[in-house]
Structure formats: C-alpha cells, structure tokens
Image (cartoon, rainbow, N blue to C red):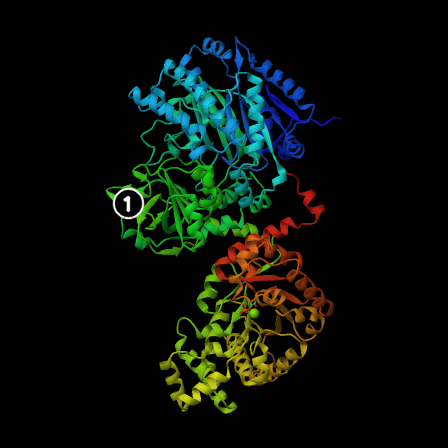
Amino acid sequence: MAKKYVYSFGGGKADGNESMKNLLGGKGANLAEMAGHPNLRLPVPPGFTLTTEVCTYYYQNKKKYPAELKAEVNKAMSKVEAIMGKKFGDTVNPLLVSVRSGARKSMPGMMETILNTGLTEKTIPGLVKQTGNERFVYDAYRRLIMMYSDVVMEKAAGIEPEHDEGIRKQLEKIMGVMKKEKNVTNDTDLNAEDLKKLCVLFKAKIKETLKTEFPDDPYAQLWGGISAVFASWNGKRAISYRRIEGIPDEWGTAVNVQSMVFGNMGDDSATGVAFTRNPGNGERNFYGEYLVNAQGEDVVAGIRTPAPINAYSQSDHNKALVTLEKCMPVCYKQLDDIQKRLEKHYHDMQDIEFTIEKGKLFMLQCRIGKRNGPAAVRMAVDMVKEKLTTPENAVSRVTPAQLDELLHPIIDPKAELATKPITKGLPAGPGGAAGMIVFSAADAVAWAKEGKKVILVREETNPEDVEGMRVAEAILTARGGMTSHAALVARGWGKCCIVGCGDMHVEGKTIKVGGKILKEGEWITLNGTKGTVYEGQLKMIDASSENQVLNDFLKICDKFRTLKIRTNADTPDDANKARQFGAEGIGLFRTEHMFYGKGGEQPLFILRKMIISKSVEERRKALAELFPFAKSDIKGTMEAMKGFATTIRLLDPPLHEFVPREAKARAELAAALGISAEEFAKRADALHESNPMMGHRGVRLGVTYPEVSEMQVRAILEAAAELTKAGVKVEPEIMIPVVCTVKELSDQLELFKRIHDEVAKKYGVKKIPHMFGTMIEIPRAALTANKIAEVAQFFSFGTNDLTQMTFGFSRDDIGGFLPDYLNKGILPEDPFQSIDQEGVGELIDIGIKRGRSTKKDLKVGICGEHGGEPKSIDFCHRVGMNYVSCSPFRVPIARLAAAQAALRNKPAAKKAKKGKK
Ligand code: PEP
Ligand code: MG
C-alpha cells in the first residue's frame, strides 16, 4: 500500500490515534484521539495532520514534497469542508485554517504557527457577511499579514533583516503610528476602517521591504505556511532547544492544519489554557487562565494578564478579574466535564487549550501537562491512591531532576522574615535562588560562563531566550501569567521563576520598582514558591526536612528497586541525616574525614604528630592518643546506622596533605614532639611527593606503617564489640583502599585477623561481626579481580580513582581542559560525573564477573561520586551490583533512579504482562 502522508480528524472520527505520536507528533496524535476515540469524541475543530515523514522527506529531498502529498491534502481539505459546511477559498462562506507545528515531544514556542490562513481579498467579503462583523474580519486579516510576512516571507525565506528590524517590527511600528494618530492605546480601539487602511499599508511595506507581494491565493498561503513550519524545525531556537532537551534532529515535526475557531468574536468568545491539576503544587483541582475576546496566542504571549477560570485559580495577581465559571457558566461546566474525562482517559494530568466561539466550546489541544518537581511527586502519589495509574507508571513519571527540586535550597525563612520584598509576582517555579541581574539571554550565557550566578530579568521571555534561561539560576519577568512562555519553560526545567511582576519596570539595563532602581550586576533573591523578590543576596538553606509526600513516593519506588542504597557518611550527624532519607547502610566512611570539621582540631593535631613521627615508638605513642577519638566516631556512626552495614575505609590520602603549612601550627607540633623547627621542616620535606595521587597512599600506608592499620582496626572492632554487648546490632565492613594486587590485601588481612583475635579475647567473645573487603579503584585490581576475591569478602568500586586511572586524567586537574573536550565533542560528558560506560564501565563489568567467578555471592557496590548519578545507577543495576552509595542528599534520587532502572531493565516477558496502562 502506498504510504499515507495525511491523517484526517474531526466530526467524531479520526484516521490516527494517541499511540501514533512518532508519526503524527504529540499534538496531531492527541487531536486525533480527542476527536475520534469512542470515549471522547470531543468538540475538536476538524483538520488534518501532515506526518513527520513528510518533514523527513522534505529535508532529504532538497525541500521537495512527496508527489502524492498535494492530492492527499486536497482530499483531507474536502473532508474538513464537508464537516464545517464551508469551503476553503470560497467567496460566500470561506473556511479559514490554522497551520501549526507538532513534534513528538512538545517544544513550547520553538516552532511557527500561522493563523487565519485562507483570508484573501476575495474571501473577505464572504466572511464579513457570514460574521456580520467587519472589524473582526479585518483584525484577523492584519494578524494573518503580520504573522505570515514574518514567519513565511522573512524567516522561512532565510532573509536576515537589516538593523535587526524584522518585518514584524516594522509593521508593529506602522500600527503604533496609527494608534498615536488616533490617540488610542489598545489595538481594540482601532475600528474596521482603521484596520482596513492598516492592511493596505502593511502590504505596501511588505512589498517594499521583502520585494514580493503578500499572496492573495488561499492555497498559496496554505503551502507557504506548511513549508514555513517545516523550515522552523531547523530554525535557530528549535535547534538550541533540541540540544538542551536531547531531542534528535531526525525526528522532524508534523504539521497540523485545522479549521479556525475564534475566541475574539466579542464578549461571548474567549480562549484559555488549563490543567486538570495544579502544575505548581500537584493539588487535584482544575486550574487555568483565560481571556475574553482574544486569540490563543494572546494567552501564551503574556501580553494581557489572563483571568482565572475558577475561584481555585485565583491569586493576588488576578483576583479582581471575573472567573470563567461566573462569566460563562455553561461553557465552564462543559469544560470541567471534558477535563475530568480527559484525565481519566489518559491516566495523567492534561494541559488543555480551549476556545469559545460565540458561546460554543472547542478543544484545540490536550497533552500531558508539564509540572514541577513537588507537583510531579504529589500527583504520582495521589494518582496511585486514586487508582488512576499503576505504581510502575507513577515511578517512571517523576524524573530524578524533578525529585531534586524537592531537595533544593530555599531562602532561609529567618533571613526572609527579616526583610521585605521589593515586588511580588506569580510563583511560576519553586525554590529559592539568588543571583546577579542580567537583562539579556546573551549576557546570561556569557556571565554564567565566567562562573557567575545570574538571574535573567526580562519584560517577558520569548523562545529566543531559552539558552539564557537555561543557564540562569532563576528567571524574573514583568509580564505574563502562569502559562506564559517563561512559566512554561521554567516549569519544564524545574527552575525557580517568577512572572508577571506588574509593578516592576524594565528600562534598558535597569529595573525600576517601588521607587528603587536596580542595575545590571546587582544581587537579587527570588522565592519562586511565593513569588516574592528581594534586594541583595539572602541566605539559602536546604528544604529537605520531613516531607510526607516525598516519603510516600519513595516507598512506592522501594517496591521496585533491587539495588540497595547506602550513603557516604563520616559523622554520626551525616549518618542520621542519611537514615532519614532512607539510606540502608554506609558504603563509605572515610576515616580521614573525621579529622576535619566539627570537633576535629584535637585529633587532627595528634594525627599530625603521628605523621611527622620518625620512629615506630613515636608513631605508636601518637596512635595511642588518637585511638579514643577514632573509636568514638566510628561507634557513634555505627550506632546511628541501627543494624545496617557500615563500610569503614582505612586511611587513604597522602600523608603530606595533613602537614600544616602555617608557621604557628608547625611550631606547636614541633614543641609537642620535642623537636626543633629545622628538624620539623626536614621531616615534612621528606614526605613531599611529585605525584601524591599515585604516591604513598591507601593500602601502601598500611603496608609500610602497619601500626596505623592496627590502630584503626582495633578502634572498629572494639566499637563493634561494645555495641554488640549493649544489644545494638552492628555490621562493620573493613575496607582497604587503592589495592592493586591481592598480596597487599593478604598482608592487611593477616594484620586484621591478629587484631581481631586480640579484641575478641579482650571482650570475651569468639567472633566480632565483620566483613573484610577492598575497593576496586585501580584498573589492575579490576583485571585481577578473580585473585582479589580469594581474599576479599566484598568489592566496592571507587570510580573516582578508577576513572582517573583509566583515562589518565587527574581528578583534580581535569577542569583545565574538560571544557574544550566537551565543546569539541571529544568527550560526551564529564566522566567524573557520569560513568564512562564504554571504558571504565567495561572494567567494572570485568571486575564483577571475575570476582564472582571466584566467589559466587561476592557483595559488590560503588562508592565513587557516580553512585548518586541516575545514568550511572542504571549502569550499576545492569552489571549486577548489590548497592550504590552516595552522599546523604542524593539518597532519595538514588532510590528513584534505582527503581526506574529496575523497571526499565525488566525482562521483556514480565513487561508485556503488565499491560499498557
Ligand atoms: C573513589 O576513588 O571513588 C573513592 C570513593 O575514594 P576517594 O574519592 O576517597 O579517593
Ligand atoms: Mg579513591
């Protein structure tokens, strides 16, 4: 059968359906579903979709269309004409259509739209007669001319306007002059005669500037529009957006041609955008905005402040405006009924666009609604409770980045209370952010590159601003509603954002607000949850206190994951925090960390004494002093873990890192050791290494100074013995770092056994619970894992060092060249953030397989930074690790990522059984 390029919808029927997003784009597939599905059959204006395959064909064939396309379009147009009882290009009862883009994944505002296509000198009189409203028709005509000349005749034709004065700007100027002459401020104050004149002036300007006539043939307009939408797939801003969102270039966009319905036909007409639940906090309430007597673009463009659709959608900002529920109760009721059906049908929150034409409701679009992190988590939990969706779906709908938003900083409430906001707008994106003011997307990008924190302040944003919005800490706009461009994009990215600060005026590179003037580079702080803006840089704190909804959601995640989640923690405080987040043990306790931070001064002093000691006796004396500190820290942390395993790593970093540099500290140490300053300097110099990361560190210390290992092992085992006696279940895992050969491990195991027996005797027990294992962080260790597993009871992959040693990139110095590597595409991403699965990952896979070839049940985990990164967690799941370990704040993300990894990698047979829902 010949390929079908055009799919019709309308009149209770549709050729396509929701499952055909790849072919029809998201918008086209949903229009088909809304129009044709037996459960819905909603009032959708009829139309047709040119598939994404037409787009692909167009780009593969020098911007030509398949031969059969024209006939298919004509046939589909006839169907629309039959349903509407109007004809495209007819002089008596003309049909007008919109031409819109629609990619597989929504790209808000990134591609083009043409409305009112089909209005020509010949069709205008017919439409005037049909509508009895000459002003409306000429307003529609001037809008078509403006849009078409800008999108089709200039942008799609690749014309670069002179002095950045595009045709649209020039036409707007003409309109501005006319308004001035007539002494009016609103477009709506221009009458039919004015608009008629304006259209003539517009067309003359277009001819003068673009050297071509505005087309007066309906089909020429239609094909011009279609081509412009396809061309906009490769427009600058669409390409930028695709890069940021990771949308492949080859997907292409579909084009939807749909009969026009008008929200601007008077006070019985309106247009709006709504969500079946609140996208800002997830509450199960119909939420939206609308404008009377307006076209859809007016709502999204954020030029007029939209009114709330119902009392629930009211805010300080719009509460004076009449709700749709009050203004048009019959249509509201119908809309409310439709939104309920849509959510039930799609099993998820929907974002819908509607238009009311002379009291008649039409559904223009529905799609899965974008939501911020708190809303995503709440909806997931609620929808499972309501049995609207399955727990599997609920888990896969929340992205790790969205969950991160719940753990994001907020302004310290105390700091916030102590100051007054300078302005208030709509809370479009939650959390707090502080940054320096910049006024253009380009400046935002440039400043962020210099490492500065910026807040992008704009009158209103437009799609050209996306790159600047991306790098900014937050976005602040003077105009626009909750569904304006800035709000929509920020919500998608979970960024702090405030829109519609009505009393803020952006003038050049200054903000004027309440008698204050703020300039570029000055600091401001935003509370995106409340919509308040403050002068200066307020203190931020983390918002991750007990959150019931988050806990409920994570419990759902826990049902699916097979990976255990541990944490990297070195103090009882951190261990407690991690437990609250749901950590199931400690995967890495870095013993050296206890010498820094709270209460670390005294043990650090003793440790330094130990390092600078020359003889074993001196060293043993210092170690004996250090012992109680080590034991009490380890004991407190194991106690906090309440029966979960605690992996304690023996001392790792190069000793010279601990030698003080300041003269005073050096003198104090020398005095404590009873040596001269010269002697001290001599001993300190002797510790110097050219390449300390590959020097005297890790197990090498334990081999040359066994007394250091002995002290630590004794501290761990005594702590464990005492806790066991006190009835606390403990599971210490002694971990040896930087091992490259099994012999190093055997050496330390022998030492360990000796101390174990001594401590067991001291406490009168046979065995103190423990495991003895190693880190795998040197390629040689991974390659010889079968031998290492003869001695080790567990492996923990130290992927920080393993990445360093596999690439030969210093983990401390990569910053010097990484940006160039990323820009040139030599590396796809920073391998210290996300596991390089091709190289480092191969070593991990080999390490696990070889290790388990010796010990079938070898316990394996990861404790490098990658343990909290979602893509790496997916990898850890696939290679069969038992657990991942990450910093306390990443534990919730790891729980979600591990659940998603389990669902994503579920055996195909099981997946099929679960069904589609
Ligand atoms: C590692 O190398 O991955 C690791 C966890 O150890 P450290 O970062 O302390 O070297
Ligand atoms: Mg390491």
Name the quadrant containing residue 798.
Answer: bottom right
Q: Secondary structure at mark 1?
A: loop
Q: Is residue 256 left or right of residue 420?
A: right
Expressed as whole percent of the image width and height from the top left, the position of residue 510 reads: 31, 43
Q: Split into 4 quadrants, where in the image is the C terminus?
A: top right
User: Residue visible at 55% across and 77% down?
Assistant: 697
Residue at the left extreme of this rendering? 515
Expressed as whole percent of the image width and height from the top left, the position of residue 734 reads: 58, 74
The kind of residue tagged 1 is Ile
Expressed as whole percent of the image width and height from the top left, the position of residue 905 reads: 66, 50
**Foreground residue, 466 or 570?**
466
Name the quadrant containing residue 426.
Answer: top left
Q: Split into 4 quadrants, where in the image is the N terminus?
A: top right
Distance from mark 1 CB to nearest ligand 1 atom below 8 Å: no
The relative height of residue 594 versus residue 26 in the rendered view (above or below) is below
The relative height of residue 780 versus residue 188 in the rendered view (above or below) is below
Expressed as whole percent of the image width and height from the top left, the position of residue 563 reads: 61, 58
Residue at the right extreme of this rendering? 1
User: Residue visible at 71% across and 28% down?
Assistant: 3
User: Residue visible at 64% across and 25% down?
Assistant: 7
The number of callouts visible is 1
**Foreground residue, 628 or 118?**
118
One can see residue 543 in this view? yes
Please state the quadrant of the image where ligand 1 appears: bottom right
Residue pointed to by mark 1: 422
**Foreground residue, 739 or 255?**
255
Label 1: few (<14), some (14–19) or many (≥20) C-alpha neighbours in 10 Å: some
One can see residue 326 in this view? no
The relative height of residue 118 versus residue 745 in the rendered view (above or below) is above
The relative height of residue 825 versus residue 799 in the rendered view (above or below) is above
